[in-house]
Image (cartoon, coloured by chain):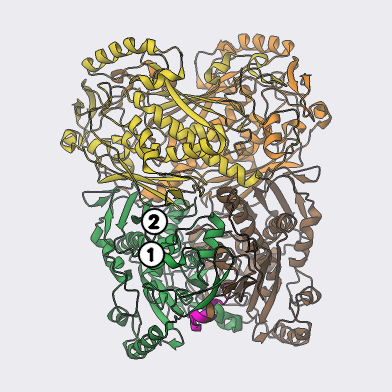
Chain colours: A green, B brown, C orange, D yellow
Amino acid sequence: MSGSSLGRLFVVSNFGESHGPAIGCVVDGCPPGLPLTAADLQADLDRRKPGTSRHVTQRQEADEVEILSGVFEGITTGAPIGLLIRNQDQRSKDYGNIMDTFRPGHADYTYWHKYGIRDYRGGGRSSARMTAPMVAAGAIAKKWLASKLGIQIRGCMTQIGEVDIPFSSWDDVHTNPFFAPNNGSVAELEAYMDALRKSGDSCGAGLRVQATGVPVGLGSPLYDKLDADIAHAMMSINAVKGVEIGAGFGCIAQKGSEHGDEMTPDGFGSNHAGGILGGISTGQDIEVRMAIKPTSSIRLPRKSIDKAGNPIEVETYGRHDPCVGIRATPIAEAMLALVIMDHMLVHRAQCGDVAVDTPQIPAGFSNY
Amino acid sequence: MSGSSLGRLFVVSNFGESHGPAIGCVVDGCPPGLPLTAADLQADLDRRKPGTSRHVTQRQEADEVEILSGVFEGITTGAPIGLLIRNQDQRSKDYGNIMDTFRPGHADYTYWHKYGIRDYRGGGRSSARMTAPMVAAGAIAKKWLASKLGIQIRGCMTQIGEVDIPFSSWDDVHTNPFFAPNNGSVAELEAYMDALRKSGDSCGAGLRVQATGVPVGLGSPLYDKLDADIAHAMMSINAVKGVEIGAGFGCIAQKGSEHGDEMTPDGFGSNHAGGILGGISTGQDIEVRMAIKPTSSIRLPRKSIDKAGNPIEVETYGRHDPCVGIRATPIAEAMLALVIMDHMLVHRAQCGDVAVDTPQIPAGFSNY
Amino acid sequence: MSGSSLGRLFVVSNFGESHGPAIGCVVDGCPPGLPLTAADLQADLDRRKPGTSRHVTQRQEADEVEILSGVFEGITTGAPIGLLIRNQDQRSKDYGNIMDTFRPGHADYTYWHKYGIRDYRGGGRSSARMTAPMVAAGAIAKKWLASKLGIQIRGCMTQIGEVDIPFSSWDDVHTNPFFAPNNGSVAELEAYMDALRKSGDSCGAGLRVQATGVPVGLGSPLYDKLDADIAHAMMSINAVKGVEIGAGFGCIAQKGSEHGDEMTPDGFGSNHAGGILGGISTGQDIEVRMAIKPTSSIRLPRKSIDKAGNPIEVETYGRHDPCVGIRATPIAEAMLALVIMDHMLVHRAQCGDVAVDTPQIPAGFSNY
Amino acid sequence: MSGSSLGRLFVVSNFGESHGPAIGCVVDGCPPGLPLTAADLQADLDRRKPGTSRHVTQRQEADEVEILSGVFEGITTGAPIGLLIRNQDQRSKDYGNIMDTFRPGHADYTYWHKYGIRDYRGGGRSSARMTAPMVAAGAIAKKWLASKLGIQIRGCMTQIGEVDIPFSSWDDVHTNPFFAPNNGSVAELEAYMDALRKSGDSCGAGLRVQATGVPVGLGSPLYDKLDADIAHAMMSINAVKGVEIGAGFGCIAQKGSEHGDEMTPDGFGSNHAGGILGGISTGQDIEVRMAIKPTSSIRLPRKSIDKAGNPIEVETYGRHDPCVGIRATPIAEAMLALVIMDHMLVHRAQCGDVAVDTPQIPAGFSNY
């Protein structure tokens, strides 16, 4: 247990700073016998990395991951898997002016007060760059879950700033730079983002992530519930300020006769539960949505103070995402994969030999 | 680490079922030297317990807590504090008809599939009755935080079903049966709830909980962030389907120039952050909101299946809250207290001797 | 994680003080489906309890355990199992004279300095009475391990004071008050203990505990090794000052050609390893020995100081074991059962689906 | 929590295999503000590394450590510290003959059965090479403990094979290749080791490690006792088969009137307790001894089986330590430092503000 580790049996211990020599993680608890290469991890890293379009930060990082341990002749051994990504394109001089100041909305102030020292360059430990190792670790989980259980995890944007993105198709998500599930929205989004970038401001975003094929039974009530751990993982992502499962905040105005998903021999009639009841997976699609706040690093001047307490104005230059939500989709997918993987192992431990007499009920229902 | 324990250094291990002999918990890690009696815990238990108005379940439980250990001559010793509450008013026959059926929206189905066995009486382990020990444990944390640091934690309802409750005053919260911060809303709420109860249906609710006086610096990035642990704790509460911090889902449509809370020598100019930046407390009020789904136990008939897979109709009788959100306020307060207490100890461990040179900046800002 | 919890997936959270209202524990993580009654736990509790012969403390405690949760219609549900034992025969006045003094060799001094407060009655939290809940929890583990895997756990004394006890038969252990594996030693032991009691002094003891039928593969290198967790668990028992596995300290003087257990198609040729290699079980008998120090509570006067630092003499009256090792056998058995149980679940989690192609080698060897 | 992590608040997550690309660890929880460079870690690594004399393995590794994160401008930030050591002198062909066989006394058999796959080269994950990252991590703890609290940790050999090493002076330890606290023993040890190496056999060793200046109060009863965690850490070291504290196994034959350390206003009269009572440090020197088994990798032929179960003879060539205990001293020191560091933080968390009214008693006694 420590601040930079996530998980109980599939544990990821993350290290690194934005402008330090390297970032990475140790993945401890991966079952043995899984074929694994760095290429398996690189695909998702490439989806996340900066510099891929004009709508995101222009920092150029190859984000090439190296596997240091835990794999022998291309197969995981059960030993910890060390993953390393060297930083290459740090431009620390960009951050010289914030050495003694606090950017509003950033962690600068809190890190300094908590630790008494702050690596200010590129946001240091608080930088979203620290999600890269999690994406690599999440790719290991994704591969195991897919190959062993047929579980698929995918995410998309639901909203960018005030622009709502109606869902059209999962297939669209990978064909535009916004992870938007609707190619028909792209023109509007491009115009919106171009104007935003010119204005020097930033916007928030809404993101959705889904897991299909999850067996019933994952989750350990009362305090390792699957939805609670999902909320924890998503809220851990930089800039997330809200998480909801299934109908989420929409269920405040629902009646019980509407919200409760009915059951028939053919399956569930709806999925307001978002795939989780009593903290345990039902076999239905797990549906998660989250809110991502607008980037704090903007060119527009903002009032703040310096370390001595003097009032100052802060304009943040450097290469920043005007909407950090855009690159968050692979990160949210990775976090969901890590949580499900961890729960799979814990469930297998406590209930691995449970046999349930259910002749007419399929192991998992899919929703209509 | 186990499914029914919450916390790292202030750990609560919960046990019990709704219709078992007793419920309770062990609180391990409470610092020594805190004056503590059962009366300190009873007040919050009384706020939570059933049977207090016609708008909640009519089950009569005294919920009297007994301290079994960890206190000597009225002072905590640093040893684990065992808390016990005997169940008295179980009416197990009320549940006879659901022994082999699954109530839609309930954990019946998932518990049975996960464990292969289900204590169906009163919802067993999945019952909201299991929040009583957490309220008792939370009262210990509340007392320590208030006496040592002046931290106050309080909650209220923001919405019941479709009825929005505009905030008027914290003082109103304790003077009506709805934990509503506005006595002017009470008549409308009573009419709404009376109609709901007659209809045999249930509704959802929106809840807000706040902590004031929290010092800057609590939270351990990246995976023990204060907001992530708060989200985890709230999502662990029965029936919660969404959690947000500060501006929450509202920040999707905000610009960075609006969302980021500016700073001046007099303090922060706003609190969209909800008191947490980069996963660490800023010293501002911590603001949390959550969504509670409508009760699944309703008299209206609903389609479901039995263990053999046959289609059936379920009508849930017995004594159930038509809106579980109403009694959730003291529970949410308790969970917030437990998370802050745990973080206080962890922060003291790693950074207990950090001195920050901040002559002009007060240790904590309050918001305007 | 907390100071009074043992285990990762089969977790026991212990609470209580020697003269408080009650002692007990919460067992969290027991697999569902195990038949369990209080009678299953009482047998081992009766082996451990005080007052059973003139050679142990004369405090009279029934040590009757009550199951508060986690069992439904006689079967474990997978939910936490709360266990409660009420204290009955506290004679707190016996301890009045040590309220402000520190008994040499006791935890009085360290508890007071650590916590600033000390429940001095009967040793408070530091009393060996706190092993009773562990014996109850260990009985649950013993039952699961025996019924599922055929694992048997048993212990005996190897030495009491200067009296060596040559091993004769496991069957003898339960037929004399010393847990001695040799009825032929009983007369000598009785004479020794009678003389010791008259003298007002105390003596140490050597204890052995063994597990047979343990499958190969339990243990998670590098820091959850089976032998490391066994050493931790045994050293946690009151008064233990040394732990060794297999040949233990005897292997310092061995050569590699003698110590390394050879292997043939018929099995291992010896068991100097004590059933564990590289921190993982080999399938051979797990052999553990430990050293238990002489009781610190003796009638003979000893030099000490009081809280003000004045020199004093301490004579400890009350009802104390002249050799705490005698009642330690069921405790050590319980601890070994808890560690193996925990490891069984963790191994099942990470490697539950590993298939090893070993046609000629039986799953487990027994030693010659 | 995971198999390759050690500690609760000062957590070391170890990764790597003997012949993989690199080994290393992540140290999470180091307090901020500690000056730290790679040179601080290199000194202890150099004491541990192979190839330093004819009495140890001749594998040549520089064991140069690189700090990847957690340090800014030479000061720790409170963020995780990534440590990396590249492997350079792997001679994997040396291990070709054991690919399908199991060396008696080695973890080959258990790893293969547990994981179904084994990186056999150089012992893979089970190699003592994996102690190098712990020595680096331990150096961080040593530095903090020394600079903040004046705690010193040092170890030495007490016995090599049948050769007892009478204690003469701590100063001798660093001046001979055996970590012997007695230069007068060196000639005898050299002759013994030369003969052993010629014979192709190996021998065991006894090791002692001590911590001075430890404040009273470290340790969290009942299951995070300081001595229990020390036993766990030492037993985790490759080849350790026994651990004892203070008088250890010698206290079996002691009487209480002799074993219990008396107290006077001038301090303790003896230290049979080894610095720990009731699982909590007393302020006296912490004294630990352990037994290290003879190396399993010897040139002498031994009976074993191959994966198919056929009887074979194994002669292990390659570059192996004839007495692994010789290089274990810096490892044991590192482990003791890590445990004390972890306990320091936990104690600070729970009892950081305890004030004990002890005008006449110094905070810590030293032994006569």
Q: Position of residue A300 (x, y in %)?
A: 46, 80
Disc 1 marks which residue?
A: A129
Q: Amino acid at mark 2?
A: Gly
**In this view, A39 is above or below D89:** below
Which chain is indicated by disc 2?
Answer: A
The residue nearer to you, when weighing C5 against C361, is C5
Q: Is residue A152 left or right of residue C42?
A: left
Classify the position of the C terminus of chain A by image quarter.
bottom left
Q: Is residue B247 magenta?
A: yes
Disc 2 marks which residue?
A: A16
- Residue range corresponding to the magenta coloring: B242-257
Pointer 2 and pointer 1: residues touching (CB < 8 Å)? yes
Q: Label 2 crowding class (10 Å Cα cut-off): few <14, some 14-19, many 20+?
A: many
Q: Is residue C309 left or right of residue C292?
A: right
Q: Amino acid at mark 1?
A: Arg
The residue nearer to you, when weighing A363 against A128, is A128
Give how far apart the Cα atoms at labels 2 and 1 are. Answer: 9 Å
Q: Earlier in the sequence, mark 2 or mark 1?
A: 2
**In this view, D76 is above or below D211:** below
